Image (cartoon, rainbow, N blue to C red):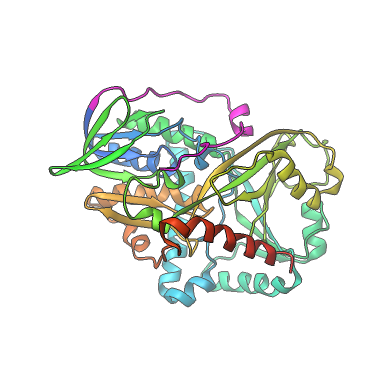
Amino acid sequence: MLERNLSPGRSWYEATIEFRPQYPKLDTKVQCDIAIVGGGLTGLSAAYHLAKGGLRVILVDSARFGDGASGRNGGQLGTGQRQWVDELEKRYGFQQAKLLFDIAERAKTYLFDLAKKEKFEIDYQSGHLSVVHRKRLLKSYQQHVDDMVRYGYNQLDYLDQSEISERLGSHLYLGGIRDRATGHINPLKLVVGLAQAAQKAGAKLFEKTTIKKLEKRGHGYTLSSPNGTIEAQRVLLASNAYGLGLDPISQKYVEPIYSYIAATTPLEKGSTILPNFESVDDSRFVVRYFRKEKNGALLFGGAESYTSSTVSDIATAVRKQLVEVYPDLNNIQLTHHWGGAVAITVQRMPFVREVLPGVTFCGGYSGHGVMLAPYVGKLYADAVLKKASELEVFKNLKISPFPGGRVFRTPMLFLAMHWFSMLDWL
């Protein structure tokens, strides 16, 4: 299990959300058809659909729902998978790459449709910019626009430096892509809405319940927490970066890294910074991602750490990057600064496997989970309920284990991530 500060700092989302229900701790012995460990986007979506399908579902989380990455991330949806279609095509061929892209588009539609059906707000704002910080990368971004047309996606525009600068309110970047059919949401509102929908459907939800042990018992499993136990026929491990170690497989393929975000005081009305309220990611290996809220607050993320120690001064780490993009904000007040663990894989694609008989792990979204995680939860539920499901597509992805074994994996990741981050300056 990941034994570190779950999520340092209080997020802007926590401070501004109007309603966030609390759920009880598990304090007794219970039985169910399916136990879900992890109350993030994957687990809550799966619980909702499984309960709607008539199964007895119990979901537990070691903290409050959304206290991990699901409720504290940058809120950017994105388009397609974490890997661009040209890389996927090289590895899997056009047909499989197209299927992966289409699944991602269905994931986007699913998120909006579910929020509309269950009548909860996610504060969607359309428009996203992917911007280039090095001249050598411009050609690949131009090519990506053409590639996406070949995949049937016509919502991208390549923008030159002057156009990007105008939309950003910054002259740092050299060009980029505008995506008209994606954008950003409030991720904590999505978590809250999913939890309420799952409970309404009949799932039993418990917060602040840490599963210490997962044991095979007869035809099912026993999950033990300090104050209660769960007996289940099947188990979904959906705690992503925070539940590694309950099974013998997932921690070989999924590794947590920390990403940090800060929020500023509202910018002046009429500010030239992100006048169209688009979200942004850049071309660095250590990606910088930011957006402006409707009240004018700028949410800026990108600082990372790769060991079990979290950054002690998040505000300073984020401000250093913020002022490189927006020098005039050097003295702006940062009202909130927080972090969360992102689960990554070597190929930056989801890791979905049956890690024990009847136990499935879904995670490793590598920063693309806002859109993908809820849909993967639905696909898991569909598979259990014997409905048509594309979960096998994710199960068949070629995901490599992290090198170094149990002892050297984290030090090797630390060295590799720092090496690639140095290349951002070349």
Q: Is residue 81 above or below residue 279?
A: below
7 in the magenta segment = yes
347 in the magenta segment = no
* Farthest residue, direction left: 218
* Farthest residue, direction front: 407
Question: Dividing the image into 4 quarters, which one contains the C terminus?
Answer: bottom right
Q: How many marks?
A: 0
* Residue 54 visible in this rendered orientation of the protein: no
Question: Percent x, y for residue 295?
Answer: 72, 33
Q: Is residue 361 left or right of residue 314?
A: left
Q: Is residue 308 above or below residue 399?
A: above
Question: Percent x, y for residue 365?
Answer: 47, 54
Where residue 285 sits, quadrant-wise, is bottom right
Q: Looking at the image, which is closer to me, 119 or 251?
A: 251
Q: Residue sitting at 32 percent across and 27 percent down?
A: 226
Instruction: Decide whether the magenta segment is chiefly helix, strand or loop.
Output: loop
In the rendered structure, which segment of residues is drawn in magenta? 1-29
Q: Looking at the image, which is closer to me, 117 or 253?
A: 253
Where residue 254 sits, quadrant-wise, is bottom left
